[in-house]
Image (cartoon, grey):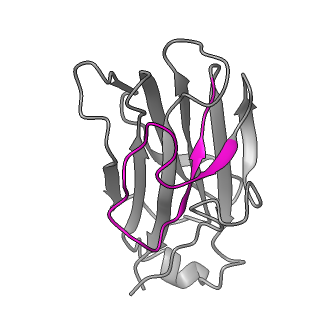
Amino acid sequence: MARNLLKNPCGEEQLEFWDLTENGGNQWKVEDMPGDCGHDFSDDGVTKYFATSFELCLKRQVIDLLAEGYSCEHLDTQPAVTVEDWYCGRTDCGCTYQMTVCLLDEIQEVMQDFKPEPVALDPDSDNCSWRQVSHTFSEYGPGLRFISFEHGGQDANYWNGWFGVRVTGSSVTVDV
């Protein structure tokens, strides 16, 4: 089984290892499951999540695949790269979620990316419980050396505090 290359995917170490590319409103915060007006998570091993605020909050990790022990030869065979993320909204406030994952070459130029349309969650009309998004990259060409994983969002009502989208359980794996 491939290992998760993201460090601190569920907030157990607060915001350690994450580059806060956007830290708006009251900024990122780590909270305990299920949180105020929250939802239970399907994996009992996940006890925390990252909460966003009333202005855009995005966080990113760039994974150096050579530093993680992968060889150029193996990476040039274009192994499948799978990314997964979990997000949810609160029961009392709408929010938006977004993610961008890029496969990068040795000078960190984009080889291929996955950037689904932002998702709007409205507690008045949607089930805002935990949802998973996943994507598997293949046939991206030789030269993969880095992977950039970025996600986040904000609340839809501009309420002071942490009423925006919640994220946890993120993963990036490379087939071996």
Residue 40 painted magenta: yes
Residue drawn at the location 42% of the way across and 53% of the way down = 85
- Which is nearer the eye, 71 or 151? 151
- Tell whether 127 sits left or right of 70: left
| Quarter where residue 87 is shown | top left
x, y (%) of residue 54? 62, 20
The C terminus appears in which quarter of the rendering?
bottom left
- Tell whether 146 sits left or right of 133: right
Q: Main secondary structure of the magenta part?
A: loop
- Tell whether 70 sits left or right of 89: right
x, y (%) of residue 26? 74, 27
Q: Is residue 76 above or below residue 121?
A: below
Q: Residue furthest top?
A: 157
Counting labels gives 0
Residue drawn at the location 39% of the way across and 74% of the way down = 79
Q: Residue furthest front?
A: 36
The N terminus appears in which quarter of the rendering?
bottom left
Residue drawn at the location 45% of the way across and 26% of the way down = 96
Q: Is residue 117 above or below residue 172?
A: above
| Quarter where residue 125 is shown | top left
Residue drawn at the location 40% of the way across and 79% of the way down = 175
Range of magenta residues: 29-53
x, y (%) of residue 88? 40, 41
- Which is nearer the eye, 36 or 107? 36
